[in-house]
């Protein structure tokens, strides 16, 4: 029997702190007029202290699971798309898994910058279609403000923070993710960078070079983006045996209104067919497509049976598009208060289970230590030659 991957839940989270263009004009030599005219952005959300890529991802993920009516303890796989992870190690996805109390889930990060969510959705849906998993939680979450150089007006006015998530579930009902198309061109790797990694020695030296901040060749990336958005959209439609005229809505990466205008013209579609919330969030990288998707659903722009293209492009260079046949009636997913209460209790219980696991691990370690101490008391110190370690090779006679 054929398997299909449907989106059954969705949720987004944006930090409450709003930073307007006017606010930024006090920080760098810029103006509301320049930013609005050249990008379409009016304001963006910035994470406060204590908010991280993982915590925003958890909030978005929890909302998506609630809409899907899926207990965190039943989640099988979590993919977190991000280019601003909490740490190099462990994966942010593991922090999200723990925070959600998704005790049975596998979890990994995926970093293809602003295309990350589209890549992650393609991977998740492919896993479901292959029969590996019955459900996957796909999250795009970013703390772009933490890698900004707040003295560089060419980048700091563009980006914002936030998270969005969807739940994918297996079904034998045709629909859901119909096709995807992904691409990359590493020859453009230097056009958009945050060089924080092992190639540049970490520490004060790296910080002094300023290389650990985001740097972007805006005009070059702009040229690439205007070409690739329409190309990628056409490709994903062709892979499903459809044409551009079959698209009901495009939910694109939110980088610049002018990119969306060029793409609409190239595709021969009215601009209204391309959803945008860029004015209120700026560019949230891997979080921009899922946040826009959630807002498009909330605004009644997506109905059951609609064909929706999500398209992303960015650092790498990378790009990708997914075509979805929307199958859920969003109205039917508005739960009554009692239902939300039950879910809230369930998520807290799942989190408590996760905390119990942590406590249990600590207890096991303590038990081990005490047992070894008792052994030492009864049997004395182990013979250094027979304590389980291999002997060093004997010197040549
Ligand atoms: O998410 C990944 C994908 N990212 C993108 O798709 C971003 C693509 N690029 C862009 O959206 C645009 O290239 C930008 C919005 C980044 C820049 O717009 P632009 O029209 O390409 O500007 P520019 O870089 O060519 O700069 C034009 C002028 C320069 O001044 P001069 O040299 O002409 O005197 C800049 O210094 O605008 C100046 N400028 C600013 N002025 C006021 C650059 N940033 C600012 C600013 N405020 N914030």
Image (cartoon, rainbow, N blue to C red):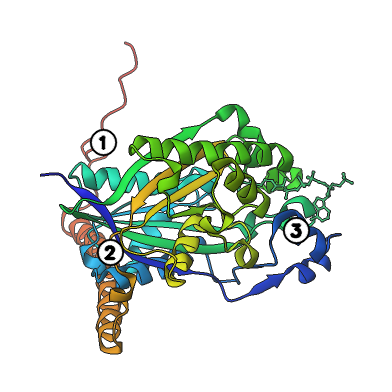
Q: Where is residue 386 in the image (x, y as percent from the top left)?
A: 20, 37
Q: Position of residue 38 (x, y in %)?
A: 75, 54
Q: Where is residue 239 in the image (x, y as percent from the top left)?
A: 36, 35
- Please, what secondary structure does the residue beneath circle 1 have? loop
- Please, what secondary structure does the residue beneath circle 2 have? loop
Label of residue 150 in the image: 3
The mark lying in front, picked from 3 and 1, is: 3
The image quadrant of residue 267 is top right
**Which residue ends up furthest to the top in the rendered image?**
397
Marks 2 and 1 sit apart, C-alpha to C-alpha, by 38 Å
**Between 371 and 148, which is closer to the camera in this rendering?**
148
Q: Determine the residue positioned at 59% across, 34% down.
A: 199
Disc 1 crowd rating (10 Å Cα; few below 14, some 14-19, many 20+) is few
Taking 177 as reference, is 52 left or right? right
Using the rendered image of the protein, determine whether residue 41 is visible from the camera's viewpoint. yes
Tell me whether the residue at label 2 lies in contact with that at label 3, contact meaning CB atoms closer than 8 angstroms: no
**Which residue ends up furthest to the bottom in the rendered image?**
338
Marks 2 and 3 sit apart, C-alpha to C-alpha, by 36 Å
- Please, what secondary structure does the residue beneath circle 3 have? loop
Tell me whether the residue at label 3 lies in contact with that at label 1, contact meaning CB atoms closer than 8 angstroms: no
Q: Determine the residue positioned at 47% across, 33% down.
A: 183
Q: Where is mark 1, residue-wise?
A: 389
Q: Where is mark 2, residue-wise?
A: 102
Marks 3 and 1 sit apart, C-alpha to C-alpha, by 53 Å
């Amino acid at each position: 029997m054929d398997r299909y991957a449907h989106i059954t839940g969705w949720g987004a989270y944006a930090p409450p702190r709003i930073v307007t263009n006017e606010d930024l004009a006090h920080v760098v030599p810029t103006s509301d007029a320049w930013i609005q005219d050249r990008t379409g952005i009016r304001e963006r959300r910035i994470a406060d202290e204590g908010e991280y890529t993982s915590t925003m991802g958890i909030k978005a993920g929890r909302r998506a699971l609630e809409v899907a009516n899926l207990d965190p303890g039943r989640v099988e796989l979590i993919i977190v798309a991000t280019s601003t992870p909490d740490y190099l190690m462990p994966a942010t996805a593991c922090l999200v898994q723990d925070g959600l109390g998704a005790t049975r889930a596998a979890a990994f990060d995926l970093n293809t910058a602003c295309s990350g969510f589209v890549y992650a959705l393609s991977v998740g849906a492919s896993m479901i279609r292959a029969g590996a998993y019955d459900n996957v939680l796909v999250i795009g979450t970013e703390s772009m403000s933490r890698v900004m150089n707040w003295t560089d007006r060419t980048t700091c006015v563009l980006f914002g923070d936030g998270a969005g998530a969807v739940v994918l579930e297996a079904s034998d009902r045709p629909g859901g993710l119909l096709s995807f198309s992904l691409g990359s061109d590493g020859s453009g790797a230097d056009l958009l960078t945050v060089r924080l990694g092992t190639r540049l020695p970490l520490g004060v030296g790296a910080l002094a070079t300023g290389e650990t901040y985001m740097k972007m060749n805006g005009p070059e990336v702009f040229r690439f983006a205007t070409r690739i958005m329409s190309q990628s959209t056409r490709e994903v439609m062709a892979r499903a045996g459809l044409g551009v005229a079959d698209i009901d809505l495009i939910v694109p990466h939110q980088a610049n209104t002018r990119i969306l205008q060029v793409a609409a013209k190239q595709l021969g579609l009215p601009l209204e067919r391309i959803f945008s919330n860029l004015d209120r969030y700026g560019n949230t990288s891997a979080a921009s497509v899922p946040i826009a998707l959630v807002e498009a659903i909330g605004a009644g722009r997506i109905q059951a049976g609609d064909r929706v293209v999500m398209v992303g492009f960015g650092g790498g260079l990378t790009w990708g598009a997914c075509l979805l046949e929307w199958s859920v009636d969003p109205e039917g997913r508005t739960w009554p208060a009692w239902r939300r209460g039950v879910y809230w209790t369930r998520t807290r219980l799942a989190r408590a289970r996760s905390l119990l696991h942590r406590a249990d691990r600590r207890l096991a370690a303590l038990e081990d230590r005490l047992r070894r101490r008792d052994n030492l008391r009864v049997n004395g110190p182990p013979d250094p030659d027979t304590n389980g370690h291999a002997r060093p090779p004997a010197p040549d006679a």
